[in-house]
Amino acid sequence: MAKIGVVLATYNGEKFLSEMLSSLVMQTRPADIIFVLDDASSDSSVQIVENFSSKLPIKLWKNSVNTGHRAAFSKILEIAKAELLPSDLIALADQDDIWLPEKLEILEKTVFCSENKNPDLVFGDANVIDAKGQIISTSWRKEAKIIESLSLENLMTGYTNLTGCLSLFKVSLLEKVLPIPEDVFVHDQWIGFCAFLNNGYVAIKNPVIKYRLHDDNAIGIGAKHIWKEEICKNLKWSKLLLNQMNSGKFEKKSVYFLKDYISYLENRLTRFFLPEYFMWAIKNSKHLYPHVRKPFKILLRSFISILGVPLLEKIKQKK
């Protein structure tokens, strides 16, 4: 029977950490090992984790200096990979959520379900809660307008439908994932992309956690970005993927699209208006904004997409 390892990176999480760890205690399919890396917390996070060591199979590592979200998860995943077999499973955890009791049981059964054609990764939905633990939505997928099935081109433009804390994946996938590149904004996105290129991933409708939204969220609806930051983030992501072309997993049409997309983003950062990209945006609307279906909205979105950052910033200053 495959082991399940839970991977958790903590940083100043004392406010919600006890509640999260308590939900691991209540799992109907208990984790076999819980890998925790504390990223140089200045609060009581380490003490809280240590207090749960009699209730949970915890292995704790501590960073002497804060390295950041991506680096911390990359390090603890390297540790988990070294201690688990390729056929074992990993569940990612965030320090501020609450797992539903059947989370690991449901996801483990889905991974090994013959109907799912042996995917590398499965992920569920979530109930959304506020800082006080009150449910504000019964579906994170619906709340965040997440599309269950995305194309390779969608993923190339920065879309992702994977939230790491909702997932369970095979340790063998880490051969593709690690080390997590520095230009990756969030580890979830990179893991999902690697799974897509390998044996794929499967979304199920079952809620598996209570996903907490609060003022300190690093990602999610609570995270705030502006036009220029989003474009720069997507440009870094797409250039990173272009460097992966030697994997042999990309068709020529996808490579051509990605190169056009990179050129488009670079022009959008420096120019006021990009009329030559209007028809290109309409033609590639299903890649650029897959959640937009109606023709009028596609036209409107395509027009907005050819407005450059200098023009958008000037409009914003006049308001």
Image: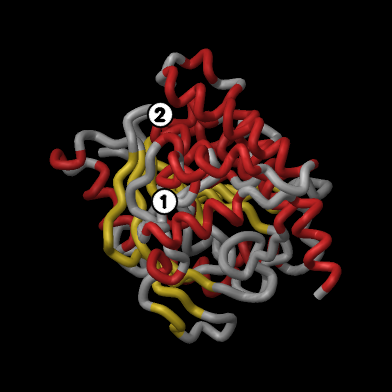
Dot 2 alpha-carbon crowd within 10 angstroms: few under 14, some 14 to 19, many 20 or more: some
Residue ID at (44%, 40%): 283
Element type at marker 1? Answer: loop
- Name the front one of labels 2 and 1: 1
Element type at marker 2? Answer: helix
Q: Are marks 2 and 1 in contact (CB under 8 Å)?
A: no
Residue ID at (50%, 29%): 257
Mark 2 vs mark 1: which is more N-terminal?
A: 2
**Residue 3 visible to an observer of this rendering:** no
Rendered location of residue 255, percent (x, y): 50, 22
Rendered location of residue 50, percent (x, y): 63, 61
Instruction: Say which quarter of the image contains residue 313.
Output: bottom right
The amino acid marked with disc number 2 is Leu
Residue closest to the far left: 115
Rendered location of residue 247, percent (x, y): 48, 16
Residue ID at (42%, 35%): 152
State the residue position of label 2: 197
Rendered location of residue 205, percent (x, y): 27, 61
The amino acid marked with disc number 1 is Pro
Dot 1 alpha-carbon crowd within 10 angstroms: few under 14, some 14 to 19, many 20 or more: some
State the residue position of label 1: 290
Quadrant in the picture for the C terminus: bottom right
